[in-house]
């Protein structure tokens, strides 16, 4: 039986969502193959949490723990941390240094995809279409006229390195820009301002499953709010339709692009990319490398539509990691 550490929590605004994802993995993992263990990675502590919610400090030298006078070491780490430090390359680098297999992509891919601006820059030469964008760093002069001239209105102001739609505002008028910029700077010191793409929004899961790159059935996002924001994502203010109501041609187009993005970036493990169709072509918004794993989350919905159970989805990720 393999000992699997499920890491959850993290240092960002997404930590509560991550705890939910991690607990779903903990409750779902195939107990005939694995001993599942919860590990909370939080700003002030890294702790092993036993079945009775007692906490024991993790030894960061080798990622082991002494609990109830027994030393526990792990064969593999299941990464369920959304945001920093699980989705930005920090944990991946640490595990690589101590020689511990883990289920998400490698350190560089994780850091690159977490930085929306850098990721889109790498993909553009490969013909991947994106929204028109304008970049701001904290302290830069804010020229509202230039921003509007470049991206138009309405536009989206986003924190460059944040997930779950934290630090994102849809701006309809020029006089709303400053407030939106202030909101984004609360999450990150870099901002990306993007043109509004008016079209069907879809989410495409691409995973390595049983050794093969697999594009899962596509999900269409229909938000009740002005866009697919935090409320739409987590508080039921959206419809997520799997499989998406796309023409066969559009389905093929976005499937090819999503797989190309995964392959160009040399991805491993889970990914979920967001696209909007503009003028009949899918435009990439961003890629998530540690997508939500609760029962309501998009990736598990897509896996279910593909006939992959949650237990199988999680087992496959662990087996892939152990192969490495």
Image (cartoon, rainbow, N blue to C red):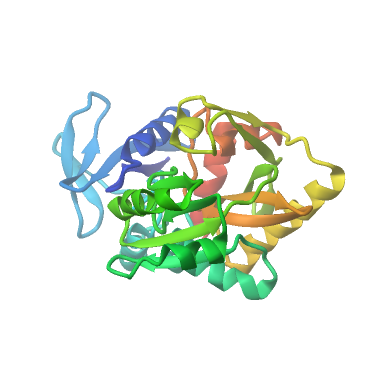
Q: Is residue 229 left or right of residue 196?
A: left
- Comparing 323 with 294, the one in front is 294
Q: Quadrant of residue 203?
A: top right
The structure residue drawn at horizontal position 33% and vertical position 48%, both measured from the top left corner, is 183
Residue at the far right in the pictured view: 248
Residue 9: horizontal and vertical position, in percent? 31, 41
Query: Looking at the image, which residue is at 69% across and 63% down?
Result: 260
Residue that sits furthest to the bottom in the current view: 125
Regarding residue 208, the answer to whether it shows in the image is no
Quarter of the N terminus within the rendering: top left
Q: Residue at 31% of width from left, 55% of height from top?
A: 185
Q: Is residue 12 left or right of residue 233?
A: left
Is residue 106 placed above or below 25 in the rendered structure? below
Whether residue 46 appears in this view of the structure is: yes
- Residue toward you, 177 or 188: 177
Placement of 310 over or under 12, stated as above or below: above
Numbered disc total: 0
Instruction: Residue 57 in the image: state x and y as whole percent.
Output: 16, 44
Q: Residue at x 80, y 48 (%)?
A: 250
Q: Can you give x and y, in whole percent of width and height, for residue 160 in the image? A: 41, 59
Give the image quarter of residue 60: bottom left
Residue 184 vs 21, above or below: the answer is below
Image check: 39 left or right of 173?
Answer: left
């Amino acid at each position: 039986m393999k000992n699997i550490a499920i890491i959850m929590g993290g240092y960002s605004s997404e930590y509560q969502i991550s705890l939910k994802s991690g607990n779903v993995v903990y409750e779902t993992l195939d107990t005939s193959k694995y001993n599942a263990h919860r590990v909370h990675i939080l700003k002030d502590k890294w702790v092993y949490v036993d079945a009775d919610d007692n906490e024991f400090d993790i030894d960061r030298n080798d990622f082991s723990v002494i609990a109830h006078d027994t030393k526990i070491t792990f064969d593999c780490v299941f990464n369920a941390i959304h945001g920093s430090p699980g989705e930005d390359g920090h944990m991946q680098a640490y595990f690589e240094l101590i020689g511990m297999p883990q289920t998400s992509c490698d350190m560089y891919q994780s850091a690159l995809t977490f930085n929306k601006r850098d990721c889109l820059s790498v993909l553009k030469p490969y013909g991947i279409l994106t929204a028109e964008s304008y970049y701001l760093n904290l302290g830069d002069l804010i020229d509202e006229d230039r921003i509007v001239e470049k991206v138009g209105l309405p536009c989206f102001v986003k924190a460059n390195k944040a997930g779950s739609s934290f630090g994102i505002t849809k701006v309809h008028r020029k006089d709303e820009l400053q407030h939106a910029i202030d909101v984004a700077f609360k999450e990150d010191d870099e901002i990306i301002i993007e043109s509004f793409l008016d079209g069907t929004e879809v989410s495409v899961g691409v995973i390595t499953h049983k050794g093969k790159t697999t594009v899962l059935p596509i999900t269409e996002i229909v938000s009740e709010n002005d866009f697919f924001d935090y409320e739409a994502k987590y508080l039921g203010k959206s419809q997520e339709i799997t499989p998406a109501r796309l023409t066969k041609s559009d389905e093929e187009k976005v499937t090819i692009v999503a797989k190309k993005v995964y392959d160009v970036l040399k991805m491993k493990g889970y990914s979920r990319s967001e696209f909007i169709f503009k003028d009949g072509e899918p435009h990439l918004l961003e890629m998530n490398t540690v997508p939500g794993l609760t029962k309501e989350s998009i990736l598990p919905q897509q896996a279910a539509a593909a006939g992959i159970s949650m237990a199988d989805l999680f087992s496959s990720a662990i087996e892939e990691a152990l192969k490495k």
